[in-house]
Image: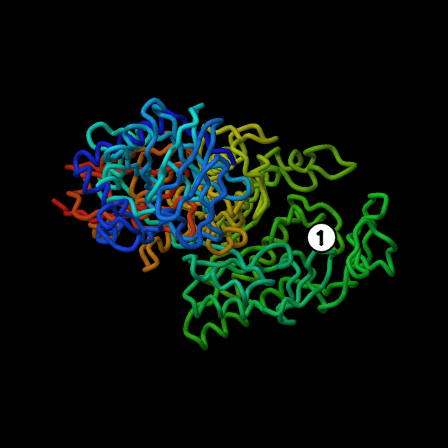
Amino acid sequence: MEVGVKRARMKAGAAVLSCALLAGGTVAVARAAMGADSGTGGSGAAEQQAPATAPSTERVMLYDGGLASGWNDIGWAPRELPKGAPARMRLFNYGGWILYRPKLEGAFGALSFRFSAPESYGEFLEARLDTPGAVVFPRVPITPEMKVRKDGEWTEVVVPMDLLNPRGEPFDRVVLRASKEVGRDWVLFDKVALVPLPPEVAAALAAGGGKSGKGAGREARMSIDCTAPGHRISPLIYGIAFDGLHEKQDTHQFRMGATARRWGGNPTSRYNWKLGGAWNTANDWFFQNVDIGVSADDFLETNRKRGIQSALTVPLLGWVAKDTKSTGFPVSRFGPQQKEDNGNGNGVGRDGTPLKPGEPSLTSVEAPPSFVAEWVTSIREKDKARGARGVQMYILDNEPMLWSSTHRDVFPEPLGYDELMKRTIEYGTAVRKADPEAVIAGPAEWGWTNYLWSAQDFAPGKMTHSDRRAHGDVPLLPWYLRQLRDYEKKTGTRILDVVDLHFYPQTNVGVGLEGNTDKDTNARRIRSVRALWDPTYKDESWIGEPIRLIPRMKEWIAENYPGRGISIGEYNFGAFKHMSGGLAQAEALGRFAQEGITSAFFFQYPPEGSPVFWAFRAFRDFDGKGGHFEDTWVPAKAADGTSLFVSRDESGKKLVAVLLNFDPDEAAQAQIELKGCGTLDSVRVLGYSGAPGGFAEQTPGAKAEGSLTQRLPPYSMTVLDLTVKKP
């Protein structure tokens, strides 16, 4: 993805450096950064300076009277590298020098070097980083503000990594080149190093460069209002999903701070608890019965041991796998098919026509409400023996309006309003009788069309929306809620506690690891989160209108069945390994807390160390020592292009805030007003911009009475861990 950084912004960033060095002692800081006292890369003042940011490494020398060990010279300018002397370059025709080290590791605060050039060249030099692949790093002009010390003909330079590498991308080479046409005179370079950022510079960057505020990026005014009413945050909003194929090896899912796991997805509609790990893969994978090697009991026990709550999908479909080997459309019976896997077909003929399925008994056995009742009873008996509840939420199947597609081998006809209600009451009653204190969620529908209509409303050969019209033209979800409310009034049996819906952006941003990461798609991915909560956001897809899913559900619940909770039972925003995916995820978690929903379950869970992984950690374990978003929501406001989510503990003396900057190129200078929160006592800052290693300690910005200033790097998550003294 391209990184466009304007020259004016670079000058502003350099002004912060200049301001800090002048205030803190130019020579001392320059020597600390570059080891001028020692004259070598071995020891000296630089190693006495504690790094101002973390992660950070010791100074890494690239060239000091010769190439440092492990570094290679691959520049294109005519040059000489005499032993024990500065490197000599002729930079005409935009010449340049590249210093390259394979598999370079570490995080650095700045690039430092010294150079000597004819005075007539003026401002001619620029620096950048590079790496193989598509990442493009900013070109940083070497302006007067970066020239921190003049020593005869030599000029010493410090360039903050914030300008060279604003998103913390891995790199393996440093490029110094002419940015304009110059003559053929020699330009000399020496003492080129990657160094910790001098503390004075780090503090100036965090605080916005002192009074001028230059170099910190655009101003972003924010406020935290501790006087306004807050609410408790449900711990279940940090949920993830079970992945049977990788349950045993992906142990990182238990290090991301997830508080709940959901046993769900298409195969669980056909799970046979009596056969251990037997379910049917449905149209996800050739309608095959398989043994995943993990049972629901194993899933519940793993969660119990790890202190994670459990949400368990129970089947309403009526059929479950009869064994671990049968298949819905075997080629031996149905003939050649569009796609095949070891003699199993996808149920579509070579000409693209869906094949008529055989009898359900090819793969399945009947699973009436008594089958579910028996399962829940067995779970509760195990709970009593352990003295602890194993299931915190039962979910009434998975995306029933898609059964005629996902499970068409056993359920080929589209589901309608009445059949959904009949099954919900019958199976829900079975769960309630077996576990009277159960929390029951449903209908676990997949998305927009089935919030409003049934599958029969789009069935071939039927008039569009005929099923909805036959039910008073009431959208499916309000009708569903009203029917269950009336059923409870009539019978005294409460079937539903939580409205469970799935949400996937329809804006072509991808699902899971997939999704483009060009600049437009990244911005749209982050914006798509607004469909969950923002009444003003018109969905940028075929939907073309505000979804405002959570406010809409709150309205429907209030009107039709008051007291129900809300769960987002499946969701993700794609591009798990890209910072835009991580920012979208962090934004979603913050909005779940803000909206006060009951639960949310990411599908399934992110790769270890990915930006989405660290989005969870921003709220659940930002410091690797259990630091987390607190349990009470505090109202807050943020400027456009940023988000601010705030929490406090029960005493009100601890505040944890998560701040997001959605701009991929420009930092934001957060000016945070604290209303009625008390006097700031301590400020700890941790940040993440995509660099390996996750959250790292950052230099706190300036604090004053009732306010705090903090710089937010481009494309970043920043955690403020605050303590306050109450009046």
Judged from this view, the residue extending furthest toward the left is 727
Does 611 sit left or right of 271 as displayed? left
Measured as percent of width and height from the top left, residue 216 is found at 30, 33
Rendered residue at 70%/37% (across/down): 458
Between 513 and 629, the residue placed more toward the observer is: 513
* On screen, residue 544 above or below 392: above
Rendered residue at 69%/65% (across/down): 290
Say which quarter of the image contains residue 507. Answer: top right
Between 590 and 549, the residue placed more toward the observer is: 590
Measured as percent of width and height from the top left, residue 33 is found at 26, 45
Q: Is residue 556 visible in the rendered structure shown here?
A: no
SS of the residue under disc 1 = helix
Residue behind mark 1: 283
Measured as percent of width and height from the top left, residue 128 is found at 42, 37
Judged from this view, the residue extending furthest toward the bottom is 385
Between 537 and 97, the residue placed more toward the observer is: 97
Q: Please name the amino acid that badge 1 sits on.
A: Asn
Say which quarter of the image contains residue 163. Answer: top left
Does 335 sit left or right of 107 as displayed? right
Q: Is residue 412 visible in the rendered structure shown here?
A: yes
